[in-house]
Image (cartoon, rainbow, N blue to C red):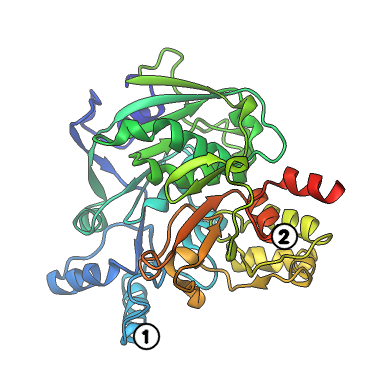
């Protein structure tokens, strides 16, 4: 892994990393920490019991409501979390102001070359910013809070080159599903870290890149990493790989012929292969499909069509919702028959009482996850891009946007 982005960031954050070798454990400095509410109370209790003072200055608490929401005493626990956060000077990110990833992105706190430790696999959302993101357990988090360092198990590094051109209606979601289909078998017994490269990267939108990165955990990846990209204005201060950087494996993908893809209960196929299958409900938004550009896209499509099945739209943050209202994106969405839901994590953690009826066929744009409260009762779960989702919502059955347009014009 000599000369990789990963190696350079590790060496910048460690005083004893002369050689970075896979399967070795290296102590690295952590720049940012985040604690979801499903792990933060044990950490606060440890701090209270040991009387150890946190040394880390950039610690965030995410009120996801994921773990405690159905407990009878959740409101009491949440009050304790907020009080402890104030006591120890941790910054709270409230769930009903949007998903924590977007809230933190809007604060502009994550820099190129930095390290970020979280007990949540979605931390890899920040990978396009040219940094290293790590998901870990409570004990590791406690150590980092009280020392500023983390003992990191070095993964193998593989390189994925993305080349070619992107066809209309192909976006980051389709790329993520393609890579999941092509690369998942590599990680059945061993996780890898992927460093992306290729002429296609600067041509993708920031939304595409964040969407792609959120899906690292569906492929059991240790993390994704990206070079500095013009989309984020970090070309001057970023961390670049050497021209002769060494990788365990290298994969090349030409995306010119990529078609709309869909994940059906873990199996990925082309949307056209299952066109016509009826859907009971559609969920668009939060982490994938809830950014401002997404709401603009939805407004444009839905200004001309109405949905034919219950369709729920979840903006990714309060700020995004506010901007969408100002730009008049919300009105055509509502007039098309959609239901607007408070910015939150949504379907993946059953927020806002989003609990589908047993036996329903559900289609969503999120990062391919259902809450533990609903996973066992869902008959079929479909995961796809916002383009396919809105087309399906309009027609009431699985279809691509191109197929929908052709059927209407025909």
Q: Is mark 1 on a helix, strand or loop?
A: helix
Q: Is mark 2 on a helix, strand or loop?
A: helix
Q: Nearer the viewer, residue 53 or 7?
A: 7
Q: Residue at x 43, y 29 (%)?
A: 195
Quarter where residue 208 is shown: top right
Q: What is the CA distance from the residue labelled 2 to the residue labelled 1?
A: 39 Å
From this viewpoint, which residue is outermost toward the right?
Answer: 409
Q: Is residue 391 above or below residue 96?
A: above
Could you say where residue 220 lies in the image, as x and y percent from the top left? 34, 41
From this viewpoint, which residue is outermost toward the left?
Answer: 50
Q: First in sequence: mark 2 or mark 1?
A: 1
Q: Which of 192 and 243 is in front in this view?
A: 192
Q: Is residue 28 above or below residue 394?
A: above
Label 1: how many residues lie within 10 Å, few (<14), some (14-19) or many (20+)? few
Quarter where residue 34 is shown: bottom left
Would you name the residue on which mark 2 appears?
394
Residue 286 is left or right of residue 193, and the answer is right
Whether residue 9 is visible here, answered yes or no, is no
Front tag of 2 and 1: 2
Could you say where residue 109 lies in the image, as x and y percent from the top left? 49, 52
Could you say where residue 69 lies in the image, as x and y percent from the top left? 37, 77
Q: Nearer the viewer, residue 206 or 264?
A: 264
Q: Residue at x 17, y 69 (%)?
A: 46
Q: In this view, does 13 lie above or below 395?
A: above
Label 2: how many residues lie within 10 Å, few (<14), some (14-19) or many (20+)? many
Residue 108 is left or right of residue 119, and the answer is right
Would you name the residue on which mark 1 appears?
75
């Amino acid at each position: 892994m000599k000369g990789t982005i990963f190696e350079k960031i590790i060496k910048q954050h460690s005083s004893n990393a002369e050689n970075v070798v896979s399967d070795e454990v290296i102590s690295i400095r952590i720049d940012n920490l985040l604690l979801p509410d499903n792990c933060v109370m044990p950490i606060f209790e440890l701090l209270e019991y040991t009387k150890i003072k946190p040394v880390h200055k950039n610690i965030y608490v995410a009120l996801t409501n994921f773990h405690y929401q159905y407990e009878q005493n959740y409101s009491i626990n949440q009050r304790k979390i907020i009080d402890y956060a104030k006591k120890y000077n941790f910054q709270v990110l409230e769930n009903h102001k949007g998903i924590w990833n977007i809230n933190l992105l809007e604060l502009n706190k994550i820099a190129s070359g930095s390290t970020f430790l979280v007990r949540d696999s979605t931390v890899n959302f920040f990978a396009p910013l040219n940094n290293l993101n790590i998901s870990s357990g409570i004990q590791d988090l406690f150590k980092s809070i009280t020392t500023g360092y983390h003992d990191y198990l070095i993964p193998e590094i593989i390189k994925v080159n993305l080349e070619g051109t992107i066809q209309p209606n192909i976006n980051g979601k389709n790329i993520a599903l393609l890579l999941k289909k092509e690369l998942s078998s590599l990680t059945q017994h061993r996780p890898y870290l992927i460093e992306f490269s290729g002429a296609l990267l600067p041509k993708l939108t920031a939304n595409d890149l964040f969407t792609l990165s959120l899906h690292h955990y569906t492929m059991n990846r240790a993390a994704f990493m990206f070079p500095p990209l013009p989309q984020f204005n970090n070309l001057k201060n970023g961390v670049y790989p050497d021209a002769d950087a060494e990788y365990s494996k290298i994969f090349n993908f030409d995306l010119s012929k990529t078609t709309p893809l869909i994940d059906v209960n873990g199996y990925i196929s082309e949307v056209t292969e299952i066109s016509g299958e009826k859907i009971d409900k559609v969920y668009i938004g939060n982490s994938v499909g809830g950014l401002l550009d997404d709401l603009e896209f939805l407004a444009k499509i839905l200004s001309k069509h109405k949905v034919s099945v219950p369709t729920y739209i979840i903006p990714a943050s309060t700020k995004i919702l506010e901007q969408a209202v100002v730009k008049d994106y919300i009105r055509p969405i509502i007039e098309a028959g959609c239901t607007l839901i408070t910015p939150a994590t949504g379907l993946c953690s059953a927020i806002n009482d989003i609990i589908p009826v047993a036996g329903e066929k559900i289609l969503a744009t999120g990062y391919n996850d259902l809450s533990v409260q609903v996973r066992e009762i869902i008959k079929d779960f479909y995961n796809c891009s916002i383009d396919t989702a809105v087309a399906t919502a309009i027609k009431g059955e699985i279809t691509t946007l191109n197929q929908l347009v052709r059927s209407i014009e025909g």
